[in-house]
Amino acid sequence: MNPNFEFEHRDWEAFHQKAFFIDMHAHPTFPASFFPPIRLLPFFPSYRHANQCDLDNLPSPRGYRGSTIFKFRTAFPLLQAGGADVVLTNAVVPEDDFLGAFLGSRGNLRRVARLPLLAYVYKQYLSHSYFQATLNMLEAIATEVDEFNRFADEMNRTTATKRRLVEIVHSVKRLKEIKALNGERPIALVHAVEGAHSLQGHKAGKGIRKYQNYHGTGQLEKEDEVRQEILDNLHTLCERGVACITVAHFYPNVVAAPCFPYPDYALGELDFLGNSEKEQIHHNLALGLTSIGREIIKEILRLGMLVDVSHCTPRARASIYEIADEIDVEYQVVATHVGAYAVNPSPYNLEDWEIEWIARKKGIVGVILMPFWTQPHNRVMGVDFLSRTIEHIRQVGGDNVIAIGTDFDGATDPPDELAHYGQIPRLTERLMAEQFRKQNKYSDELIMKILGGNAWSVLENGWRYGCGP
Ligand SMILES: [Zn+2]
């Protein structure tokens, strides 16, 4: 008998749809926030109506491989096609220095902001404090969900196509109710925030250079006032249902410092003004957490939210583990969208001792669907290294630590075979191929854990806000 017979005859798609799929890190909030005006243009399929085939035909500026914000990989019909059950949807406010790097100065930003589409983005987000912009993004995704549900309701009543509704879930209590529903479950979106700069209001300001110094030996002006503002804003986000904070993002912020955050080839594409060398200088792996940062991490953990170490420098990550050890928390420290250092030695990726530490503390390591991070950079892009990364994390941290964080719609460059949510079942196909290849080392049970079981235990036990003392 053909040895591939058993694998070829497993219904991986049905298996995938049966799994409770959790994505620990994606960005439906991003297109929902930035593209309301773009959706009105005829050549962009509407975010809420987009389907697989639309996406394959979207224009890619300058033939770019796919790391573009103009692809709506997490459109709600695609989440349905991909069998998504819970998606942590990240609000991410562009940092001023990011814009500065590509536009030269705030003066240019104001000039560009007169362009019709950008005027909207400027007015809603860039002209505000990071914190206010974050709140506006939480509003934007809520509006998107309402509009979609109206459309889906109508469609369900009048056509044979059945659309799953989408719900923004603000507590783990509601999440459990949804999980218990059989059959007609809404897709649950859970708020998350990427970059602790989102906590910076007018007092903390946007002075990233200032924070760069502060990470070193520098004193922060009006430190007490800034600290109070950050704590107040953290409490507000927590009350609004934000479950997880990725503390670092692109530039040093009031809490933590990041690794260099984007692929050099992407930088080349974006570097209109030739500033990329200058950019690299501002990323310093010797930086870690600020003194306020240590306090903020403790408060996030005390409140019952998840702390995501993705993007942090190795030094900042080590400090977060130390703090979590000190106050002895479990389920709350996670890496939502990373690779493994042993597979691809980039400081962005977790070293083996970190994977072990997170596993011991019952957290998860969410594997990012982006070859640039999962594989050494001189290889052909594909899913091979994705399974290699998953297998490595399993070997080091055991069966209960692996999860998935697609980072879709975070302007990433996913594997060609997994270019949007509609293709996520292929991940399950891949895991089942491993199951076959490794003679059942990948049991059905383990695959279910990777697809969502492990992430569920983190949400169920780690996201405690609103569940009493
Ligand atoms: Zn990220």
Image (tube, rainbow, N blue to C red):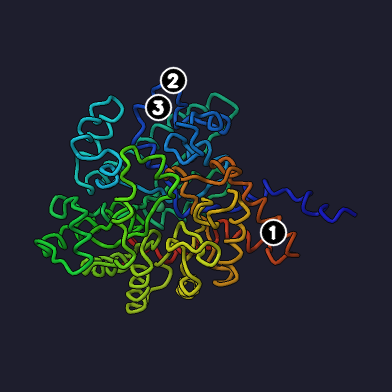
Give the position of the C terminus as an image quadrant.
bottom left
Quarter the N terminus occupies: bottom right
- Which residue type carries mark 3? Arg
**Residue bearing mark 3:** 39
Distance between mark 2 and mark 3 Cα atoms: 8 Å
Number of other residues with Cα within 10 Å of mark 2, as a class: few under 14, some 14 to 19, many 20 or more: few
Q: Whole-Å distance between the Cαs marked 3 and 1?
A: 40 Å
Among all residues in the image, which is located at the extreme right? Answer: 1
- Residue 118: image location, x then y, percent: 29, 30
Against 355, residue 247 (above or below) is above
Give the side of residue 143 with respect to residue 176, left or right. Answer: left
Q: Write down the residue under mark 2.
A: 42
In the image, is 238 to the left or to the right of 149? left
Return the residue nearer the eye: 43 or 175. Answer: 43
**Where residue 434 is drawn, which disc sits there?**
1
Q: Earlier in the sequence, mark 1 or mark 2?
A: 2
Choose top left, top right, bottom left or bottom right for residue 255. bottom left
At a point 24% along the width and 67% down the height, the residue shown is 290
Identify which amino acid the numbered label 2 is placed on: Pro
